[in-house]
Amino acid sequence: MTLFGTNFLAGTQVGVGSVGNVAVTPTQPSQVTFTAPANPGQVGTVSTQPVTITTAGGASASGSTLIDYYLAPAITSVVPATGTAGDQITINGTGFVNVDTVTFTDSAAATAVFTPISATQLVATVPGGLATGAGTITLHTCGGNSNAQDFTITWPPGTGHRQHEPSSRRPRIGGTGGDVPPPSAVAAPSAARARCRTSAGSNGQSVPPPAGCAPSGPPTGRPCAHVPHQERPPDQGPGSGERVPPRGIKGSGPVPVHQRSV
């Protein structure tokens, strides 16, 4: 510290209240620089002590110059302990007197806007420009820097890593509105579908699907009804329009031939 005045002569000493005296050697008669002695017995956050200077000519008036001793601030808690830029947090502790800076630190450092509440509490706004993740908060007063209290910068609402989307937002199949099926869902026709197919009999005749199966349609999509028919016996005269009964069986008359619809 530097005192300014007059008649600062050799052999001068500076007295700091009840803390003690410090011997100094003035470099010029109008000012003297000295290091304030420690105040280990200080109890309050601020201890005000009068400063006097004594030379061969006498002592200066006591009380005209004062010096304040500050205890270093200490942070005990931060509520909440996480936040993003613009959030307000409450910092609790001791020694919050004449706080001049509140600093948020991660890989860099940024000072915050704050509002003192009392000697044990203040409210600070989380500054922008800090990387997300774990960091610390410190305070500074005339007494020095506080301890570093943990604080975590979080992602702002609505941003951050892309999370799993609900099925309603997954890609769709060509405008059908359904979820894209996984590859395992694209499989061979089931046994029930195979059972419902029309097959050919041993004599080449088309065999209808079992009961309960929906009829399959032609490529045009129109329904195709199965028309039962009988195979023309080999002994029927071609183009006669009548069925000739097998040998040894008496017929009762012409039997109409069922024509297959094409």
Image (cartoon, rainbow, N blue to C red):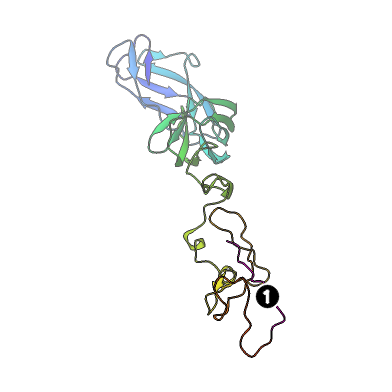
Instruction: Write down the region rendered in magenta.
Output: 251-262
Left or right of 46 on screen, residue 227:
right
Q: Residue at x 72, y 81 (%)?
A: 252
Amino acid identity at mark 1: Val
Q: Is residue 234 above or below residue 219?
A: below
Question: In x, y percent, where is residue 165?
Answer: 54, 47
Within the image, what quadrant is residue 3 found in? top left
Q: Disc 1 on helix, strand or loop? A: loop
Q: From the viewer's perspective, is residue 162 above or below residue 86?
A: below
Which residue is drawn at the image coordinates 48% and 44% (left, top)? 162
Q: Is residue 89 above or below residue 191?
A: above
Is residue 119 found inside the magenta-colored segment of the image? no
Q: Name the quadrant of the C terminus.
A: bottom right
User: Toward the viewer: 31 or 261?
Assistant: 261
Q: Which quadrant would residue 89 be assigned to in this image?
A: top right
Depth order, front residue of 67/187: 187
Residue linked to disc 1: 255
Q: Position of residue 30 (x, y in %)?
A: 33, 10
The chief SS type of the magenta part is loop
**Residue 63 coordinates in the image, percent (x, y):** 50, 16
